Structure formats: C-alpha cells, structure tokens
Amino acid sequence: MSHAPTDSTKRKRAESHSSDLAPVQRSKIWMPYGDIILQAESTQFRLNRDILARQSSVFEDMFSIPQPAFEPTIEGCLIVHVSDTAKDWESFLAVLYHPDPFRSVASRPYTVVASMLRLGKKYDMCSPKEDSLRRIYGEFPAFFELPDSSDKGWTMIDYEDNIYAQMLNLACECGLNSAIPRLGLACLQNLPRRWSGTLVTLAFALERILEFQRERLDWLHGNAIIPHKSCKSPTACVKEQKAISYAIACREEYPFHVGYTISEWDEEWDDRFCAACEAAAMESYDASQQKGWELLPTFFGLPPWEDLKDAV
C-alpha cells in the first residue's frame, strides 16, 4: 500500500534538490552602473543593456519588450538567464568591456575567439563574430595556396596544446564547413594516431586520404616513371626510389605522411635521382596537388568546395 509523502519527506527532498544546485556567484565583471543582470550557469554578470543591445539584435529586441512588473531583481536590475557557459560569457565580456573592444590586435587566445564566435552567432553580434571568422580563416583559409617560406606559424590565434582538435570541434559546432577540411588535415598531421584515430570524422577521412596518397605517390612504385627512358643510371635511381618508398612506409604515425595530400614536392627527395627521373617524378607528384585540394572536403564527408556552405 502506498503512503502519501509527509511534510518531513517533502522537506528532505527539497533540501536534497537544492543542495545539488551550484551556489550563484558574482562575476568579476560587475559594472557598478549596470542595469541588467545576466546569469549564465551559476555565474551572474552586471552589465549595461545599451551596450549589449548595440552589439546584438537579439538583445535589442528583447530589451524593447516591456518586462513584467513583478519579475525578480537584484539591486533593482532585472535578471536575464542564458543557456550558454559562464566561461564563454566571461571571455566575451572581457573583450566587450575593453576600452577598444574589437581593435585589430595581432592575436587572441583561442578561448576568446571561440566565445566571440559562439555568442556572436547565437545573438547576432556582427563585430565579435566577424573578428573570430577573420582569425579562423586567416589561420586555415578555404582556398588553395602554396606554402610560404616566410610562414611564421600561428599569427592570429594564440597557439596552445590541443588547439587543432579544439578548433575542429568549434568549426563543426558552429557550422564552419569550409574550415573543416584544412582543420581536419591539420589534426591528422599534429595529433597522435591513438587520439585522431578514435574520432569518427578523422578516422573516416584518414582512410580516404591514404587511398588518395597511394595514387599520388604511385611514382614510387613500379617502373612506369622511374627509371625514365632518358635515365643514364637506372640501377641507382631505382635504388633511391625503393629507399624513399621504404622510408615513407616505416613512418610511425601513418603509412604515409598525411601532408602529402596537398603538399609540394618534398625537398628531402631533391638530388636523389638523375635529372630526367627527378623531373618525371616531380611532374607526376605536382600534377596531383590540385586534385588533392579539390578532393579534400570529400575526404571528410563534405560536399566539394563549390557546394560547401557555412552555416554562420
């Protein structure tokens, strides 16, 4: 027979439920003349609604609607609950309340770039969103370009451990489809195999990339290209051909270096063959470089470049 819960039982359940909730805390971003309290998770921020409305059409519309008279307030400020992380808002507001918030700084931390993109997209804030997109596509352009010998590495986003995987996740989360091919390739190049091989997207791509690379490195196998018909030292050139093929096959990370997908001729192969064989091998390798770029999105299960659209 069931029993109705007693007052004592109800009280215990209520106490248990309330104890599971994190205590509300005040953020360091607490403007003394702010007129709105924004709460993300268990963190509250006191802000100026005019500043938010100026950046975001979503907040502008929200604040234009008359609010009920008996809504709870803190220090006379209405509380607005958002479903984002407190970390995203803290990173974003630290930039927003800077004297020159979206100035052209050379580089920003990844956490700031990510928060500006997430919140900029969700709340229709053009300046932070465009700042983030400019940096992401500055590091990982969605167009083919030859490597620059003066490349200084990361210049628009601060490099940190595991940044490739974080940025790939961010691109997938925010619909930056045209950034995924380069980011995915960078993950395969820079993450240990035991990590990248466990990610479905990367595992799917790796199989197709290696299949393409076998085609691109076909000049290392058989005698269709080496020795060339004009080769004056076929024995020596075939020996070098086999040596390079063996060295690539013995790589610890993958059977082939994933960079061979769109990379230029490897300088390590210079002067290994006679002039005729080297020219023939280089011609074969370089001819497939553009093809590798054109196929790159499809390796990750995406449409070709011309049909690839961002959802941001």
Image (cartoon, rainbow, N blue to C red):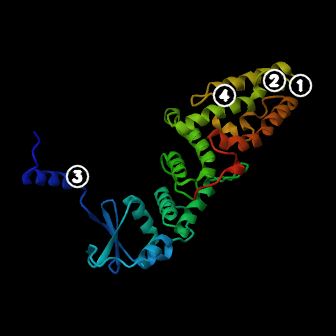
Q: Quadrant of the C terminus?
A: bottom right
Q: Position of residue 36 (x, y in %)?
A: 35, 75
Residue 309 versus residue 253 in the image, above or below: below
Q: Are marks 1 and 2 in contact (CB under 8 Å)?
A: yes
**Left or right: where 14 falls relative to 53:** left
Horizontal side of 304 relative to 108 (left or right) equals right
N-terminal of the two: label 2 or label 4? 2
Q: Dividing the picture into quarters, in which one does residue 67 lie?
A: bottom left
On the image, which quarter does residue 65 sit in?
A: bottom left
Residue 20 got which mark?
Answer: 3
Separation (CA) of disc 1 from disc 2: 8 Å
Residue 99 visible at all: no
Q: Amino acid type of disc 4?
A: Ile
SS for tag 3? helix
Q: Residue at the spot x=72%, y=37% of the render?
A: 266
Q: Earlier in the sequence, mark 3 or mark 2?
A: 3
Above or below for 191 versus 48? above
Which residue is under mark 2?
237
Comes first in the chain, label 1 or label 4: 1
The mark closer to the camera, 2 or 4, is: 4
Residue, x 85% and y 34% (percent of image)?
279
Q: Is residue 126 visible?
A: yes
Q: Which residue is mark 4?
A: 248
Give the SS element for disc 1.
Answer: loop
Give the mark toward the camera: 3 or 4. Answer: 3
**Mark 1 / mark 2, whichever is N-terminal:** 1
The amino acid type, in three-letter code, at marker 2 is: Cys
Residue 248 point in image, percent of width and height:
66, 28
Q: Which mark is residue 231?
A: 1
The answer to whether 109 is drawn above or below residue 238 in the figure is below
Measure how far apart labels 1 and 4 are at the Cα level.
Answer: 24 Å
User: Residue 24, position in %: x, y?
Assistant: 26, 63
